[in-house]
Amino acid sequence: MIRLIDITQDDIKNGVQGECDKCAIALALKREYKTDDVFVHVSDDTSTPFLQVNKKDLNFRYENDVLDFIDCFDNQDDMDYPSPKPFTLKVNEQIK
């Protein structure tokens, strides 16, 4: 099953740059999963984004789009980066 999570303009406006639990994606995950236990991180070694909810890794599509969004969001004060735009995160959820 695919869960679609909208990262909105309000998430971008209210998110905190460089904060793993307060960035725009984290705010959208908190809203969708109704929990404060979220973590958004990019591995320094592999430049791979990781998203966690309730200490479980999310399996999501379009990893490069998520990485690009995080780069733009965290560097939005830098004129060399484009402004982050709202997008829809596609999470693959396994039915058990």
Image: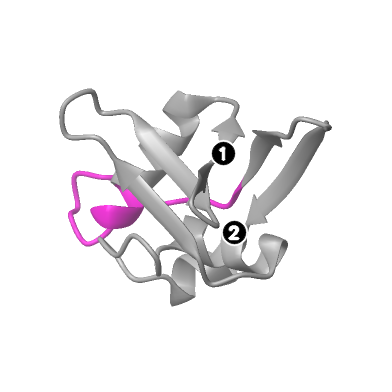
The residue sitting at the front extreme is: 96
Dot 1: within a 10 Å radius of its alpha carbon, few (fewer than 14), some, or many (20 or more) residues? some
Q: Position of residue 57 (x, y in %)?
A: 51, 40
Query: In the image, what residue occupies the spot 34% across and 60% down?
Result: 20
The residue sitting at the bottom extreme is: 14
**Residue 79 numbered mark, or none:** none
In the displayed structure, would residue 32 be above or below residue 85?
below
Which residue lies under the disc numbered 1?
58
Query: In the image, what residue occupies the spot 17% across and 34% down?
Result: 44
Q: Position of residue 45 (x, y in %)?
A: 16, 26
Q: Is residue 81 magenta?
A: yes
Q: Is residue 65 visible?
A: yes
In the displayed structure, would residue 86 be above or below residue 66?
below
The quarter in which the C terminus is drawn is top right
Taking the image as shown, residue 60 lies to the left or right of residue 15, namely right
Labels 1, 2: front one: 1
Residue 1: quarter of image: top right
10 vs 39, nearest the viewer? 39
Residue 46: quarter of image: top left
Query: In the image, what residue occupies the spot 48% across and 31% down?
Result: 65
**Residue 29 numbered mark, or none:** 2
Total of numbered circles in the picture? Answer: 2
Q: Position of residue 84 (x, y in %)?
A: 43, 51
**Circle 1 sits in a helix, a strand or a loop, which is it?**
loop
44 vs 8, nearest the viewer? 44
Q: Is residue 45 magenta?
A: no
91 vs 35, nearest the viewer? 35
Q: Which residues are magenta?
A: 72-87
The disc, 1 or 2, on the residue closer to the chain's N-terminal end is 2
Taking the image as shown, residue 12 lies to the left or right of residue 94, namely left
